[in-house]
């Protein structure tokens, strides 16, 4: 009987060990799966960060149309279309790069040029425009000779936002490629596309062959098509462009004397030691507004150290309407903003009655929700935001019709939920610092401490 018990106990031991080994193996597999998911999340993070909820389909599409074959390659028309509703490419413009799949060279270009020619010493007679394996292309400046121009070229790389000016949101050039394939089956698509607009922030996907582009003749009576077409899509991520915000927002109202400023160091204080006081002699010296090649800013000394500030002031209250004043101030001495855009998200923007000094366009990425709008300057009036200084601001007022079911001045409802300037989201103040109504239940901590101290002194004297 005792032998049976010991035998039973002895046989149960391997089973128990197998159980723990199995649990250990399962735990290892679970940890391995979790690690794999974490790695996958980190890999996908840059792409997910490029998603903009206020412009979910916004991108820059680069289209290559092969229009003819040559003895050793092809001629292509390259068109860049900015399909972003409120994000433009400002001066000094875009920079486009790629890597050739084989040993291609660029024989000539119309409407653009490469930054370097590279080593073309093996060529005799005709020398290519560029022999670099990784060419970098720039747009030409306005006013170049007509024989160097191409349709939609020569704007110094500046591209308007699609929602602001569709005709100005396109840039194009022509390129003649040699030592390449001479048919649809032998052409190798370029790889590793890069786009600066003008700084970092854009991520480009691989080139993808699409149905050939169809053209209409000038008389619109005949259709022709490209011999081959491929597209490259580039999306923008503010996280890749800059680790800090580039603008901030301040608030004020008619019902409270308190002004809610931008948060301290809202855009980082890395330029704190190189800033310029507005009342100093340096701010008025000659050449202070001259940009640098590296686009390094020269900021006016402020507590927030942002290049741009947006101020939202709740100005007036009527029976059926309310009025807001919006002011944009530039604190960068080396940058002016041409064709700037301002996007605000607020539930009452579905009832905008009048915008006095800006142009306005509703943005409705989701048809059921109309709470976002884009403000931009009137052409030849205030579409240019000047450098920091007396002229470095633009402002307008907005009249909105009240919705009796939702309108209130309580709990900061009158202030925007999100603000974007030139496509970058601005940092808003903390909600508990918003201007409050005088009759709201706001408690001043300093007043409580003073009252408590007075009561304590009174009790001690008794």
Image (cartoon, grey):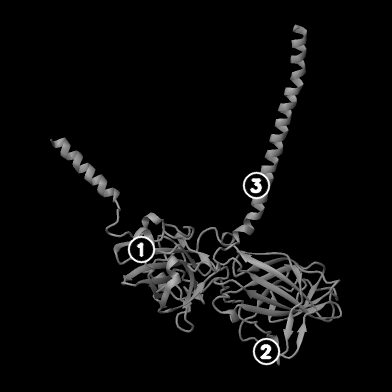
Rounded to the nearest whole Å, what is the CA distance between mark 1 and mark 2? 59 Å
Single out the residue that lies furthest toward the front.
Answer: 405
Residue nearest the observer in this picture, 280 or 198: 198
- Which residue is more in the foreground, 369 or 461? 369
Say whether disc 2 or disc 3 marks the residue closer to the N-terminus. Answer: 3
| x 74%, y 15%: residue | 9
Q: Which mark is nearer the camera, 3 or 1?
A: 1
Relative horizontal placement of residue 394, taking residue 290 as reference (left or right): left
Q: Is residue 371 above or below residue 446?
A: below
The residue at which mark 2 appears reads as: 146
Residue lying at 74% horizontally and 68% vertically, measured from the top left: 207
Q: Nearer the viewer, mark 1 or mark 2?
A: 1
> For the residue carrying disc 2, how many other residues have a C-alpha within 10 Å: few (<14), some (14-19), or many (20+)?
few
State the image coordinates of residue 222 (x, y, percent, origin top left): 75, 89
The tag earlier along the polypeptide, 3 or 1, is 3
Kindly give the residue lying farthest to the left in the view shown: 462
Q: Element under label 1?
A: loop
Asked if labels 1 and 3 touch by Cβ distance under 8 angstroms, the answer is no
Number of other residues with Cα within 10 Å of mark 3, as a class: few under 14, some 14 to 19, many 20 or more: few
Q: Are marks 2 and 3 in contact (CB under 8 Å)?
A: no
How far apart marks 3 and 1 lie (CA) works out to 44 Å
Give how far across and how far down residue 361 sits, in percent. Answer: 50, 75
Left/right of residue 401 with respect to residue 341 in the rendered view: left
Q: Is residue 392 visible?
A: no
* Residue 38 - label: 3
Q: Is residue 64 left or right of residue 155?
A: right
**Percent x, y for residue 310?**
43, 67
Question: Which residue is more in the foreground, 277 or 137?
Answer: 137
Which residue ends up furthest to the top in the rendered image?
1
Mark 1 = which residue? 408
């Amino acid at each position: 009987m005792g032998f049976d018990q010991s035998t039973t106990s002895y046989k149960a031991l391997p089973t128990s060990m197998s159980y723990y080994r199995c649990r250990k193996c399962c735990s290892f597999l679970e940890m391995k799966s979790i690690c794999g998911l974490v790695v996958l999340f980190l890999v996908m993070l840059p792409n997910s960060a490029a998603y903009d909820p206020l412009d979910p389909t916004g991108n820059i599409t680069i289209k290559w149309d092969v229009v003819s074959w040559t003895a050793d390659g092809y001629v292509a028309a390259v068109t860049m279309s900015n399909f972003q509703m409120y994000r433009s490419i400002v001066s000094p413009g875009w920079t486009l790069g790629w890597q050739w799949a084989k040993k291609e060279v660029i024989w000539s270009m119309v409407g653009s040029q490469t930054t370097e020619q590279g080593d073309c010493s093996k060529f005799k007679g005709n020398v290519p425009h560029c022999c670099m394996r990784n060419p970098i292309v720039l747009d030409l400046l306005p006013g170049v000779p007509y024989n160097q121009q191409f349709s939609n070229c020569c704007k110094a790389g500046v591209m308007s936002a699609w929602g602001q000016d569709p005709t100005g949101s396109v840039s194009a050039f022509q390129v003649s490629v040699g030592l390449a394939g001479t048919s649809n089956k032998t052409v190798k698509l370029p790889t590793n596309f890069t786009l600066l607009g003008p700084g970092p922030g854009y991520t480009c996907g691989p080139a993808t062959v699409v149905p050939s582009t169809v053209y209409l003749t000038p008389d619109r009576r005949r259709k022709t098509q490209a011999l081959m077409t491929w597209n490259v899509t580039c999306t923008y991520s503010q996280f890749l462009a800059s680790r800090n915000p580039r603008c901030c927002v301040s608030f004020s109202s008619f019902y409270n004397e308190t002004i809610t400023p931008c948060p301290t160091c809202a855009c980082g204080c890395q330029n704190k030691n190189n800033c310029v006081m507005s009342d100093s002699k340096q701010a008025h010296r000659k050449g202070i507004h001259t940009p640098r090649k590296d686009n390094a800013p020269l900021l006016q000394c402020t507590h927030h150290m942002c290049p741009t500030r947006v101020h939202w002031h709740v100005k007036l209250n009527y029976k059926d309407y309310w009025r807001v004043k919006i002011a944009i101030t530039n604190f960068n001495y080396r940058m002016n903003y041409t064709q700037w855009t301002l996007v605000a998200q607020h539930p009452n923007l579905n009832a905008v009655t009048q915008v006095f000094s800006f142009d306005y366009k509703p943005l409705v990425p989701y048809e059921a929700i109309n709470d976002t709008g884009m403000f931009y300057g009137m052409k030849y009036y205030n579409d240019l935001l000047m450098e920091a200084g007396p002229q470095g601001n633009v402002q307008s007022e907005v009249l909105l019709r009240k919705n009796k079911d939702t309108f209130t001045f309580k709990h900061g409802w009158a202030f925007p939920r999100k603000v974007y300037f030139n496509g970058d989201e601005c940092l808003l103040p903390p909600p508990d610092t918003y201007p409050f109504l005088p009759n709201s239940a706001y408690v001043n901590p300093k007043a409580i401490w003073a009252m408590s101290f007075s009561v304590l002194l009174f009790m001690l004297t008794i």
